[in-house]
Amino acid sequence: MVNRSRTRQVLSFALCLWVSLAEGGTSRYSVPEEKKSGSLVANIAKDLNVAVGTLSARRARLVSKSTKQYFELNARSGDVRIKEKIDREELCGQSDPCVLQFEIVLENPLQLYPVEVQIEDVNDNSPKFSKNELLFKMPEQIPVNTRFPLERAQDADIGTNGIQSYAISSNEHFRLDVQTHSDGSKYAELLLEKQLDREAQAQLMLILTAADGGLPQRTGTAQIRVSVLDNNDNFPQFSQSVYRTQLPENSPRGTLVTRVEASDLDEGSNAEITYSYGQVPERVLELFQLNPSTGEITVLGTIDYEQTTKYEIEIQATDGGGFSAHCKVLVEIEDRNDNAPEVTLTTLSSTIPEDSAPGTVVALFSVRDRDSGDNGRAACSIPGNVPFALKSTVQNYYELVTRGPLDREAVAEYNISITATDRGAPRLASERVIRVQLSDVNDNPPVFTEPSYVMYLKENNLPGLLIGSVHAADLDTEQNAKVTYSALPGDVGDLPFSSYVSINSDSGHVYALRSMDYERTRDFQVRVRAADGGSPLLSSEATVRVVILDENDNAPFLLYPLQNSSSPASELVPRSAGPGYLVTKVVAVDGDSGQNSWLSYQLLRATDPGLFTVGRQSGEVRTSRQVTSPDSVKQKLLVLVRDNGDPPRSTTSTLNVLLVDGFSEAHLQLVDVPQEEGQQDTLTLYLVIALSCISFLFLLSVVTVIATRLYKARQGQERYMASSRNFYCEPSFPTNPADTSGAGTLPQSYCYEVCLTTGSGTSEFKYLRPLLPSVPAEPSAAGGSLLDSQVSSQLKEGKESVCEGRASVSEDSIPRSSGAGCIANKVLGINEDCGQNGWLSYQ
């Protein structure tokens, strides 16, 4: 018999092992209960097809799902052995199958192998009745075939090791009828086959035996005592033979479960019914209370669905005559969502690089809910504002993985709340917080506080002067955030920028290496690079524009009249000129800019101070009163030209003015004038000849320029214009000088052209005056004709030659970078009239 039992166990173990290997997902094994500690369950390395050395190298460990650790893993051999003796009845009770679950976890890389071990029942418990003696009171007139339910014996074992049969000792009145419940359990009823006779036998003693199907077989017995009562005609009758009810778990004490009701047609004490429990387990007595008078069943203890899902209660109703009836109460326990899901962390990587690829595993955890149905189905979630996601793996395991790119500079640490929520009503949830830190990588270049810097430096500075500083910040940390500054190669004019400025590599300070000259260099740009100390090195660039500020280091320069001539020209003024007559105009320029170039004119000294005035802003020399005969023929004026700088600089211009009655040479010879007046006439003649030559040269220059441009236009006008001419442009120069309210050096009616050669710091200015001095429009206004016909014809011929070559200016290209006030070209014109009628203005 013992050999047969061992053979069955071996076959059962082999069958379970074959099924676990055939499924390929979860490894399944079985072991009998009550095996001693250290017994071999399986060699997991062999069954998982993993080398034994691999288990140890990958730090294999066994993670149990139960509170007790029943098994242990030997990573060196791969054997799974029993760590603690297993009692199936204590572990699972009547639940079948009884399964213990655990996982084999391998790291580097992470792998998970679920394992189930089924605990096989061993027949180590005998059937047992709750009472040693069962008492029945039966009237002698009870009908034949009346049934009396008997208490079921309890056996902690299951299956074939549980109760399989009942037997009763031999007698002539009763036999035993064994029935089977829907769940497969056996129960017995006492069936009356022969009517009782109290006078013949008042009491019967029977032996009830319960036997299981184990090997060896175990039995349990109880004594049945039947007392035969005197005649009672009616039995109590229940309204229902089976009462079914549902009871929510965790119902409070005193909650009504159901109410049973029985009636008896007898009267008096024979109709008084008392309710009592039949043969019920002790657990029912602990949880439910029966009112013997009303038949109400109420809750006495704590109802837990997770322990037992239903209860079967036998109720007996007994009248005063001793007659009794029986019914059953089936109580089904309704599950309530009273258990929150549990999150168990298996593996966690607390620090990951910020450049981790999407899908990197951060943590592995499992979720378990002890409830059933929807109450036991749990779902995990994490906040949506974190770059992580949950990935479901085997059974109730989840992986926390990266979902997208990570940025330590934005968020250096995450506290990820994992929320497990079941589907019950109301829903229960539990939370587990996982802390994940990001390690820095060099993924941020230094960033300048400004895309471009403008620094100002006064000219004539001292070498080594601090101009300003640049600053760049790096969002990385430690060595990745250490910034060094350097300047990119470049030139300022013909010299490298390194001869102009120097940049401190650590602080970003910019120093001037040489003294600057505003008139030579207005500004220059330097490209600065900021590089961090990471690997690979990252950098960014910014533009530093150094603007040279002007100082008043240039005195005004006279354009007209020129002061370097050995015999300065004289201005002719007719004696008929009235107040406000324009004698001439002093024209000066200043190489400085801004207010340093604003010029003012002042009559410093004159032969007759009351005869002439000088426009403070225009430089125009006009008569302040009517010229009279007593006035000296030769007038000498000293005009002071001063700029607006601090300190101001100035220069003087000497003007010679001749008061004449007419401009004819013949007339001048007839007039008896002193010797110095004859010299003045000679100067006037030279002036006319010089003006004629200048006009001829101007006409020739215009023709030459037009021909050259037409020739060059065929080879590309833009290339020629870029290489042959530069325009002097002053952004602050007003478009219309007359609109400056008297500020500036020239009024609207006088224009000049500035031509600058490439790389030259000097300028050439051309000033155009009328060919003849100003005279009245009508000859009578001057007191008669003073012009000789021969001179008039020569002057007219010369004027016509100039008029025939009247300049036509081609359309010049203007650089797009030019600002307001840029002089693009000069338009010149000549009028054949004389005096004020010959003065031209441009608009």
Image (tube, grey):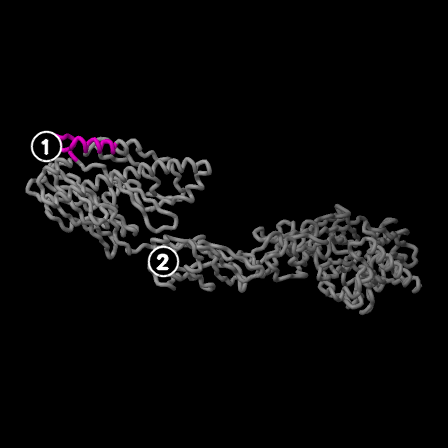
Amino acid identity at mark 2: Met
**Magenta-drawn stretch contains 99:** no
- Cβ atoms at labels 1 and 2 below 8 Å apart: no
Q: Is residue 265 visible?
A: no
Query: Given this view, does label 1 or label 2 mark the residue nearer the observer?
Result: 1
Which residue is at the front of the view, 492 or 361? 492
* Residue 231, x across and y down, in percent: 83, 52
Question: In the rendered image, which residue does mark 1 sit on?
Answer: 783
Q: State the mark number for residue 207.
A: none
Left or right relative to 565: residue 548: right
* Residue 773, x across and y down, in percent: 19, 37
Mark 2 residue element: loop
* Residue 188, x across and y down, in percent: 85, 54
* Residue 639, x across and y down, in percent: 18, 49
Q: Please report whichever mark, 1 or 2, sits nearer to the chain's N-terminal start.
A: 2
Amino acid identity at mark 1: Gly
Question: In the rendered image, which residue does mark 2 sit on?
Answer: 516
Residue range (magenta): 775-799
| On-image quarter of the N terminus | bottom right
Query: Secondary structure of the magenta portion, mostly?
Result: helix
What residue appears at the point 51 percent right and 63 percent down from the top-left corner? 482
What residue appears at the point 76 percent right and 53 percent down from the top-left corner? 312
Which residue is at the front of the view, 266 or 729? 729
| On-image quarter of the C terminus | top left
Mark 1 residue element: loop
